[in-house]
Amino acid sequence: MKYLTVILLLSTLFSCKQPEQKTESEVKYFEGFVEFQNTYQTGDDSRAPGKKPVAVKTVAYLGKDGFFAREFVDSNNIIINREIYRPDSLKTFYFNNDSDTILAYDVTRNKSSELVSVTKNSGLKILGDKVDIITVKRLVRLIGTDSVYYVFTTYYNDPKYHIQPLTYKCFLRHSVKDVFSSSPFISVGYKTMRNNKITYLSIATRIVQAHVPSWHFEIPRNKIIIEQ
């Protein structure tokens, strides 16, 4: 009777289906948008926002095919500028809504960024989830001078939401590929520091998974594109 009990117990254990780890092809990539609250520390930096309209809120849209866009919204809930990345062009486009020009940057060129460190599974939580912390050290050269300084950019990525690899696959500019290859998840926070002082902090207040219409990633036709 004792041996029969052991056999039945072993049969029950081996008949239970063991959980399988998801393969990359089974991962469901995030499609939707993330809303952020922004704060600035202008200090004595003459290039800081100052009296110009600043974005108190940012909305980042991620499409299912690797398209990405950000809208920067002022205190009157008006979109003041936008950023769009199209993997079919390998360019990022920046433009103010009241300007007739668009600045286009080739993302396959990385001029001055260097990945410094990656810290995962830290104690920091945003919207209830632990986040990866990735820091990028960027060398900035002042135009027309020999002066340089370093800016540290920190990404806070949420492992709960996988990002479509096409969003960062060839994106070398600002070390984006390095950042998201090591932590392939959506960003729920973003911080820049100069001279050990925070100059910009953006933290997610809401994450919404939903279909994102393609018009969010369309480049306006009534503006002049200037290649950088």
Image (cartoon, rainbow, N blue to C red):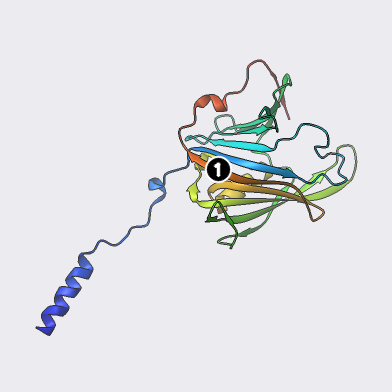
Q: Residue at x 59, y 47 (%)?
A: 188
Q: In which quarter of the view is residue 108 placed? A: top right
In front of the other: 216 or 24: 216
In front of the other: 220 or 227: 220
Q: In which quarter of the view is residue 61 placed? A: top right
Specify the quadrant that holds the C terminus.
top right
Residue 160 in picture, x, y percent from top left = 48, 51
Q: Is residue 212 left or right of residue 26?
A: right
In front of the other: 221 or 56: 56
Q: Is residue 139 left or right of residue 218?
A: right
Residue 90 is at least partly visible in this image: yes
Q: In which quarter of the view is residue 205 placed? A: top right
In the picture as drawn, the residue positioned furthest to the left comes out as: 1
Residue 16 in picture, x, y percent from top left = 23, 64
Amino acid residing under circle 1? Arg
In the rendered view, tell whether residue 111 sits above or below residue 73. below
Number of on-image labels: 1
Q: Is residue 208 left or right of residue 139?
A: left
- Classed neighbour count for the residue bearing mark 1: other residues with Cα under 10 Å, few (<14), some (14–19), many (≥20): few
In front of the other: 195 or 37: 37
In the rendered view, tell whether residue 156 sits above or below residue 95. below
Q: Secondary structure at mark 1?
A: strand
Residue 93 is at least partly visible in this image: no
- The residue that disc 1 covers is 206
Specify the quadrant that holds the N terminus.
bottom left
Residue 121 in picture, x, y percent from top left = 55, 61
